Image (cartoon, grey):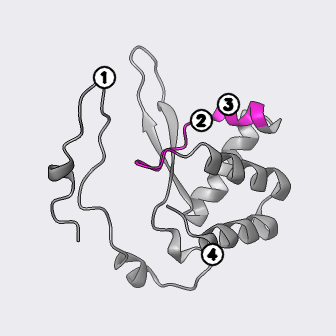
Amino acid sequence: MIKPAQHTAVVKWLGTNSIRPTKAMRLWALMLEHLYPHTGQIMLTCAQIAEKIGITSAHVSEIMGELVKLKAIFIERRCLEGVQGPGQAVYFMNKHIAEVGSHATEEELKRIPKPAFAPRIIEGRQQPDIEGATKGVP
């Protein structure tokens, strides 16, 4: 999902720009270890990341904010039944981070191909609709 040059660009950016460069690079590596390849979801919560790296959840959130600013990841909020607030943060690797470290304009970034279908959660033994999911994909 992520090319070596993209990974290198993110690591270089974190080393130069992060307020916690060493922790940020460890966080980035940990996310790549726990990446679900079919959806790009990072299969760890903020609390799990904090525990594995040995930092606070607040520091994880700060570093994640840096990665969002860089467009290396994006965050989706999922509401939990019976829980108030913005919802649980679910992290995803940006599949289109070719622009990381480049000087691409917004217009150039808009031309990066996007998936032709919306990912969905498959529960139980339900089989994915492979034919429907790939319609319109070259």
Q: Which residue is mark 3?
A: 48
In the figure, residue 103 lies in which quadrant? bottom right
For the residues marked 1 and 4, what is the alpha-carbon distance in whole angstroms?
Answer: 37 Å
Q: Position of residue 4 (x, y in %)?
A: 62, 70
**Label 2, label 1: how far apart the Cα atoms are:** 20 Å
Q: Is residue 123 above or below residue 109?
A: above
* Secondary structure category for the residue under label 1: loop
The answer to the question of whether label 2 and label 3 lie on touching residues, with beta carbons closer than 8 A, is yes
Mark 2 → mark 3, Cα distance in angstroms: 6 Å
The residue segment tinted magenta is 36-52
Decide whether residue 67 is among the magenta residues: no
Q: Which residue is mark 4?
A: 5
CA gap between label 4 and label 2 equals 24 Å
Crowdedness near tag 1: few (<14), some (14–19) or many (≥20) residues, C-alpha within 10 Å:
few
- Mark 2 — residue? 44
The quarter of the picture where the C terminus appears is bottom left
